[in-house]
Amino acid sequence: MSPGETARLQAHVLTIFPHMFPGPLGDSVTGRAMASGLVDIHAVDIREFATDRHRSTDDYPYGGGPGMVMRPEPLVAAVESVLQPASRVIVFSPAGRRFTQAMAHDLLASGHLVLVCGRYEGIDDRVLALTRAEEVSIGDFVLTGGELAAMVVLDAVIRLLPGVLSTSEAWRDESHSFEGLLEYPQYTRPVEFRGQRVPDVLLSGHHAQVAAWRRQQALLRTRERRPDLLTPDHLAELDRSSDSGASAGGAC
Ligand code: ADE
């Protein structure tokens, strides 16, 4: 980056465990993106915005029930302290909209993310409207808090930044997200390992046949593992290829 240029993605992560960041994001591809100044990640301690004597960030739920709820005052104050005109404010929760590759592209476009990590039984619901936040889930399971979800989302967004991945890695991502299929199986040396051979077509040097095989494997894998991703066009393509006796699987 040239002098004076600002990071292309800035993120403020609001958490009661700021020492968890950057954590694994400080290594490898994301670590290099941070070191080169393309990405700025700031962990903000929500507790700093608590005003009572005990700096408490949680309280009992109205209406009763188990666990504690994060109080609205420190959370809203923490969000407002970092808010910019283009910010996207995300609150992590298993009750949120499911995170996808399309959402990763969309978040990147904003340039500034405010990621709120809930703990306990969740956060006071008024925070969502007051900060114009969106609730996001990274999957149908329950984590102990939003910190790991924030790391997952940041990793997925950072790798999309131009210049973060090499050209060949970036190409892989494009092909994967635009064709909407799971990836075909990959192999490297040796040709034979513990009795399992790399499929002959990959050794043939015949580019068109390799491309056709990969496409077919991607379709078959997707039908087996994630049939919900298949479009009518994919299904028609599978019907046509079933005549040729294709089956899912890797090495022969
Ligand atoms: N917090 C707890 N579980 C979560 C999930 N599945 N996604 C996002 N945030 C969460």
Image (tube, grey):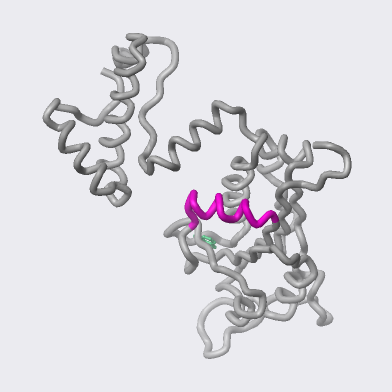
Which quadrant of the figure contains the C terminus? top left
* Residue 202 % position (x, y): 34, 15
* Residue 71 % position (x, y): 67, 79
Which quadrant of the figure contains the N terminus? top right
Q: Which residue in the rendered view is the most extreme toward the left? A: 243
Secondary structure mostly taken by the magenta-highlighted segment of the chain: helix
Q: Which residue in the rendered view is the most extreme toward the right? A: 3
Q: Is residue 103 above or below residue 133?
A: above
In this rendered view, identify the residue nearer to me: 151 or 247: 247
Q: Is residue 73 magenta?
A: no
Total count of labels: 0
Q: Is residue 103 magenta?
A: yes
Q: State the extent of the magenta-drawn residues as a range.
A: 99-111
* Residue 145 % position (x, y): 59, 62
Seen at 34% across and 23% down, the residue is: 211
In this rendered view, identify the residue nearer to me: 66 or 71: 71
Q: Is residue 156 above or below residue 124?
A: above
Q: In the figure, residue 119 lies in which quadrant?
A: bottom right
Q: Is residue 196 visible?
A: no
Q: Which residue in the rendered view is the most extreme toward the bottom? A: 63
Could you tell whether 249 is left or right of 40 in the image?
left
Q: Is residue 190 above or below residue 141?
A: above
Seen at 70% across and 52% down, the residue is: 20
* Residue 231 % position (x, y): 28, 48
Q: In the figure, residue 221 lies in which quadrant?
A: top left
Q: Is residue 103 visible?
A: yes
Seen at 81% across and 47% down, the residue is: 6
Q: In the figure, residue 235 lies in which quadrant?
A: top left
